[in-house]
Image (cartoon, rainbow, N blue to C red):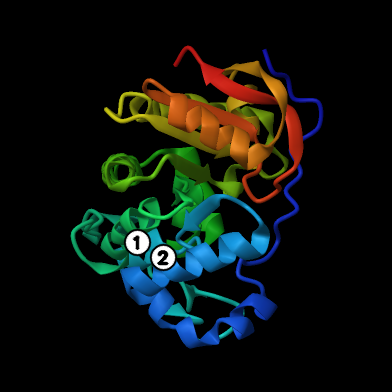
Amino acid sequence: MHTISTPFKCSLHKSILSEEFYHQHSDLFPAAYLDAAPMAQLSIELAKTLKTPLCMLPFDYVAEAEAYGSELIGYNDGFGLRTAGKLLHNIEELADLQPLSLARGRLAKIIKAISLIDASEYTPCLNLTGAFSLLELLLPIETVFSAWRKRPKVLLKFLASYEKSLLEYTALAMNAGAKVVSYSDPLTALPLLGRKNGRQIAEELVLPFFHHMAQIPYKGVIHVCGVSSDILTAADADWQEVKLETEKYYTQAIIEQACSAQGIRIFGYGCLHQNRLTRNLVELRQL
């Protein structure tokens, strides 16, 4: 059983696309955001630069917000894609948003790029943005947390729709060749929420979502970022250590678990961007 001693510290405070990397590959922008082939090519170049076998797509955390209608900027600069402002002003406007389209737009291009990477020597990984971080892109953050305390039907209905879309998105990505799916929701970090709120969010929203994730009829790993793992532990989630036979780099160990999995396995308390040597992984059990 994993326990929280100190909150997991994330050292990734900027876009994974560094300004230096952007300038070295500026000929691929903005096409690498818009079309599958240059997107896959750039992802492989990034994996080479980072010396990792894992190709993570998308490069940003705003693809889902864009699919809901958020305006993005940064297609041609080293800071990367980001929202130009809030799409909505109040919670009630969530009712006007249509479910995510996975057949067109950038989400469809990401799925296609995953299939192209799968044909290479690299392992494709889909990045997912958790519900609260998505909501913060659509609405002022104080509006988001105020609404969560009151649990209005419009918010709960939107969250259910978003999670259903993420499940479909994950299934399509795995069908296209993704072996790993990375889930991150830094707006649910315990230092922001506190134990009580974190426990409620985990029990009512996040743990049920991962229960559904575990039922996806594909084989692979859902990787929960360390920051997002803490609130699950606050809700007494059953994390167990998995000892490796030999010391391995973290991403390689996750890939090996994904390729040998008989179904969906969920690992956490690590970071796919910090490719450190390890003898242990931490797995979420008994969903």
Between residues 92 and 206, which one lies in front from this camera angle? 206
The number of numbered discs placed on residues in the rendered structure image is 2
Cβ atoms under marks 2 and 1 closer than 8 Å: yes
Q: What amino acid is at disc 2?
A: Ala
Residue 71 shows up from this direction:
no
Determine whether the residue tagged by mark 1 lies in a helix, strand or loop. helix
Q: CA distance from mark 2 to mark 1?
A: 5 Å
Q: What residue is at 67 percent from the left and 66 percent from the top? A: 14
Farthest left residue in view: 103
Residue 85 shows up from this direction:
yes
Q: Residue 262: give x, y in percent of width and height.
A: 38, 20
The residue tagged 1 is 113
Classify mark 1: residues with Cα within 10 Å, few (<14), some (14-19) or many (20+): many
Q: Residue 50: give x, y in percent of width and height.
A: 66, 60
- Give the left or right position of residue 134, taking residue 196 as reference: left
Image quarter where the C terminus lies is top left
The residue tagged 2 is 40
Determine whether the residue tagged by mark 2 lies in a helix, strand or loop. helix
Farthest front residue in view: 121
Q: Quadrant of residue 263?
A: top left
Image quarter where the N terminus lies is top right
Between residues 54 and 182, which one lies in front from this camera angle? 54
Q: What residue is at 35 percent from the left and 75 percent from the top? A: 34
Q: What amino acid is at disc 1?
A: Ala
